[in-house]
Image (cartoon, helix red, strand yellow):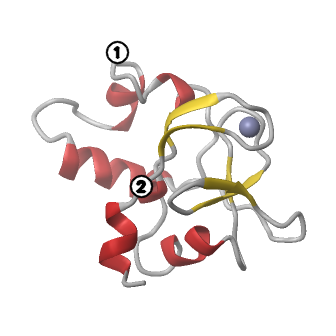
Amino acid sequence: MKLQQILLEMPAREPCPHCGHLVADWFREWYESESEQPMIYKGEKKAADCPHCHLGVKLAVIVGKADPIVPILARSRTAAENWVLQQKAGIYRNLNHFLQSNDPAAPDYRNYTFRA
Ligand SMILES: [Zn+2]
């Protein structure tokens, strides 16, 4: 599958396969596009984390449990900041502005620990 197709199939409004918490948007795009997103998609080499229980998930078309031996990678603050600037330009000034907003996707990540 090509990266472009992968990017079109972002999992949204799906429950965490570990804790069952419904996540409005899993934000695979808050990982670096070329280097990290394909790994997160397959759940091989790197796993994303659930913003609530922080267990490892793979973000394919459907959110699945990652193999427990796969290292978990937190979402990138830099990638998330860039996403706000590119996708939410003119609406939110920066990532914190977005996270404090009433956007339905924001609450899941208000207390999330990003990596730099
Ligand atoms: Zn969870």
Extreme left residue here?
A: 90
Dividing the picture into quadrants, the one containing residue 73 is: bottom right
Residue for badge 2: 10
Dividing the picture into quadrants, the one containing residue 93 is: top left
Q: Is residue 43 left or right of residue 79?
A: right
Q: Would you place residue 11 above or below residue 71 in this image?
A: above
Dividing the picture into quadrants, the one containing residue 56 is: bottom right
Q: Would you place residue 1 above or below residue 21 in this image?
A: below
Front-most of residues 98 and 19: 19
Residue for badge 1: 102
Residue at the spot x=30%, y=51% of the render?
83
Q: Is residue 86 left or right of residue 7?
A: left
Extreme bottom residue here?
A: 2
In x, y percent, where is residue 45? 72, 79
Extreme right residue here?
A: 69
Q: CA distance from mark 2 to mark 1?
A: 21 Å
Q: Identify residue type, mark 2.
A: Met
For the N terminus, which image quadrant? bottom left
Q: Identify residue type, mark 1.
A: Asn
In x, y percent, where is residue 112? 61, 35
Extreme front residue here?
A: 62
Residue at the spot x=77%, y=62% of the render?
66
Q: Would you place residue 50 above or below residue 83 in this image?
A: above
Please tell me whether mark 2 sits on a helix, a strand or a loop. Answer: loop
In x, y percent, where is residue 77? 48, 51
Q: Quadrant of ligand 1?
A: top right
Disc 1 residue lies near ligand 1 with CB under 8 A: no
Residue at the spot x=40%, y=30% of the render?
96
Residue at the spot x=53%, y=74% of the render?
36
Please tell me whether mark 1 sits on a helix, a strand or a loop. Answer: loop
